Image (tube, grey):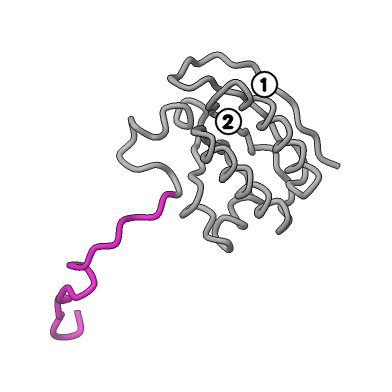
Amino acid sequence: MSTLSHASNTTPTSLSSFDLTLTGALDAATVLAIRQDSAKAATDGPVLVLLDVAAVTTVGASGVVGLLEVLHLLRARGGDLRLFGSSAALETTRLQAHLGQVARIYGTREEAVDGGQRLERARHQATGFRWLNLFARRRRILGWG
């Protein structure tokens, strides 16, 4: 059984922000609650939904697909969904589903609020593809050592 609770909002941003904390399983029922709360918060205009995923224990395929739908819904309305926190279950899913290429997962709430602007590169964000590295010459080492 998973629970979804509201967290206090302490950091101002250019968008109004809405905090949610996810505890337990990330599945279809949980994503439905996230979608309803996000849609309700976005009725007044674009909103930044900050989802704390540190306490996620299991992740289902329907949870990943549902999060991507919520992300699409919020971005279509001019807002955004940002995940933050460290969860072993979500880390495994992120690696298997390449979730980091679609939605960034930040370490802390402050990093999620500023969108990784203070960082050189947001955590779990895919590095840029460089053509020069594709055909770069590798050094050859002669001998045994």
| Tag 1: amino acid | Ala
Q: Which mark is residue 50?
A: 2
Q: In this orientation, which residue lies closer to the viewer: 3 or 144?
A: 3
> Which residue is outermost to the bottom?
143
Crowd band around label 2 with a 10 angstrom C-alpha radius: few (<14), some (14–19), many (20+): many
Residue drawn 43% across and 44% down?
A: 123
User: x, y percentage for residue 21?
Assistant: 68, 30
Does 21 sit left or right of 129 as displayed? right
SS at mark 2 in the image: strand
User: x, y percentage for residue 29?
Assistant: 81, 45
| Tag 2: amino acid | Leu
Identify the residue under disc 1. 7
Does 139 sit left or right of 121 as displayed? left
Q: Is residue 124 magenta?
A: no
Q: In this orientation, which residue lies closer to the viewer: 139 or 89?
A: 89
Q: Quadrant of residue 117?
A: top left
Q: Main secondary structure of the magenta part?
A: loop
The relative height of residue 92 versus residue 87 in the rendered view (above or below) is below
The relative height of residue 7 versus residue 107 in the rendered view (above or below) is above
